[in-house]
Amino acid sequence: MKKKTGFRLVLVVVILLLITVFFMAGLDQYFSIQYLKNSLDEFRGYYGQHRILTMAAYAGAYILVTGLSLPGAVIMSLAGGAVFGLFYGTVLVSFASTIGATLAFLFSRYLFRDWVREKFGATLFAINKGVEKEGGFYLFTLRLVPAFPFFLINLVMGLTPIKTRIFYLVSQVGMLPGTIVYINAGTELAKIESASGILSPGLMFSFFLLGIFPFAAKGVTGFIRRKKVYSKFIKPKRFDYNMIVIGAGSAGLVASYIAAAVKAKVALIEADRMGGDCLNTGCVPSKALIATSKLISHIQRAGEYGLVNASADVDVAKAMDRVQAIIKKVEPHDSIERYKGLGVDCIQGRAKIISPFEVEVNGKILTTRNIIVATGAKPLVPKLLGLEKINYLTSDTIWNIRTLPKRLVVLGAGPIGCELSQCFSRLGSKVTLVQRGDGIMKKEDPDAAAIILKRFQNEGIAVLLNHAAKEIRITGEEKQLFCDHQGKDICIAFDEILIALGRVPNVKGFGLEEIGVELDKNANIETNDFLQTNFPNIFCSGDVHGRYQFTHTAAHESWYASVNALFGLFKKFSVDYRVIPWATYTDPEVARVGLNETDAIRLGTKYEVTQYGLDDLDRAIADSEDHGFVKVLTVPGKDRILGVTIVGHHAADIIAEFVLAMKHRIGLNKILGTIHIYPTMAEANKYAAGVWKRAHAPEKLLAWVKKYHTFMRKEKR
């Protein structure tokens, strides 16, 4: 291992030495148009006397320049055309550039891949994903459409899993069109005899080719992709709609709203209820029931507030009736009547995509230029032995109960499992929370999850970690869950079981498989940065592609999906995932935006931690909610925010200031300089900024200031 590292170090030193010699010896001056013109006759004369030697020297120099990623490849390509002509120049440059590119590729792979993967794994993820999915065609696209400098492509591709043989062959073919364009320009450049020659038709045409080549190449690769993917389908001559949206949840509602707002003709198809999961089985009902359970917890804590003999009897049926009443109250926001009024054709029925341009619903075929798939997700139900024998609950069906389960088992300690465990425990159920792993809320930092775990345990929730569910048995009228815990069988008796193991995308039953829309390894719809599937006119937003399964993210994505679908002919926008906040509505709440420590360590990102405890905050103390913290990750030595985690009362509300700050690159210094109303929970943000400021106080300057004040206290005579 040491021998290998030593050789790498020597190789790096040699490469750096060669690059240093190149610049210190002034060799870069020879790579200019002016030098080429002044020396062209000399080069051509030497070539006339020593043809093979000149070609070999030129090819060797070209390989060295490209292999070391030095500037000058463009000038050398022009020189190749000027000296050797179109045919020989093309042959020489084509092979020399590919060999040099492959050397740079190998240098990058051998010297830097492990280090870059460790330090910049997230940055390489998208490129690796493209290589894994499309292999050589992905590289061919980069070669044919020079969106990045060729030398950069060589170095970056060395960090990916692409095979060297594939890299060489694709580079040889992919760079050939561009090589011909540059060589042709060089041949025309050689014909200039005077200043007026600059305006010659041949040279002007060559420069025109150089200018339009990237756009033409981009068009060609796009055409190849489209031709390949649409080859089995007939495109209609006219369309009923500019856009059809499948699914009327958060994503579909926003997408159709935007389309109607810009006067596109849009149809919104929904098989079940308008509003989707968020309105009917997710955000709205869960927060309504959480509000009831929160009130119960306050009544149980009445003694802390100076109240005597406060109590309440829980009527779960009435609590659930309240949940349904709240859904009905919110329902008009997402109703058919509202969206029809906005100009959306709302269709009740099950959609089936029969081609990239046709959707069948209620026996009728509708044609459309674009489709947005916004079919959401559904609860993940595991293959658990015996589960089929009972009527288990999920986050979709739990809202139908009208009798409180005496013993409730919750399988899964993610956001849904944690929220509903605490909720039903406060309503009066004896709750057992079962988690396969060694902690709850695994997407959050351990210190944040530890606060919630302690609260659960204090409230009487039995939290069983490292318990893997194996089987459900029914003995008489007793239902039992058997788990494996460190090799031992643990039996948990229950009346109801809630499956809360996450959600899986709704991708089956409406034609995706039949027409060939690609899915990733987790069965999410595969999309690019513009939210396009492998069919450029079929877009996707919301839970169905599984990136971030949040209502607010679905709405955010739908702006990009709808705008790209309707106006992508002129301009497309990459979806912005830089600042995505979320919250888990336990008590206390856990809110998060950007990186936490767990992610930063995994990605190898350097950071500083600033933490402010809410036990110091006046408003939290006054409300008897003085628990939790504000934790801010920043760039070392700077106030730029990388991420924030807040655990506490109304954490989901007070984190909004940090979301705004990260979105618009506002640092902690400006948050510290912003007036916050006293006393509020939001003051915690300012105090956290103050903690950071004290840790970065200019000690040397303050020492001089102290001397100044000491001097000013002395009596002047």
Image: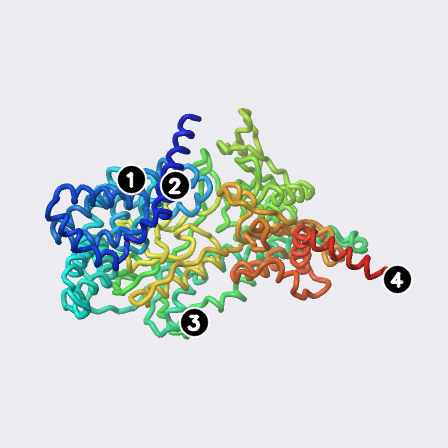
Q: Position of residue 539 (x, y in %)?
A: 34, 58
Residue at image position (53%, 41%) is 601
Which residue corresponds to mark 3?
337
Q: Where is residue 620 in the image (x, y as percent from the top left)?
A: 72, 56
Q: Which of 388/506 is in front?
A: 506
Is 374 on the left or on the right of 686, as rendered? left
Q: What element carries label 3?
A: helix
Whether residue 297 is visible, yes or no, is no
| Depicted 283 relative to depicted 339: above or below | above
**Distance between the alpha carbons at the discs numbered 3 and 4:** 82 Å
Marks 2 and 4 close (CB-CB < 8 Å): no
Question: Depth-wise, is mark 2 or mark 1 nearer the camera?
Answer: 2
Residue 103, label in figure: 1
Q: How crowded is mark 1: few (under 14 residues within 10 Å), some or many (20 or more)?
A: many
Q: Which amino acid does label 1 sit on?
A: Leu
Q: Quadrant of residue 288?
A: bottom right
Which residue corresponds to mark 2?
16
Which residue corresponds to mark 4?
715
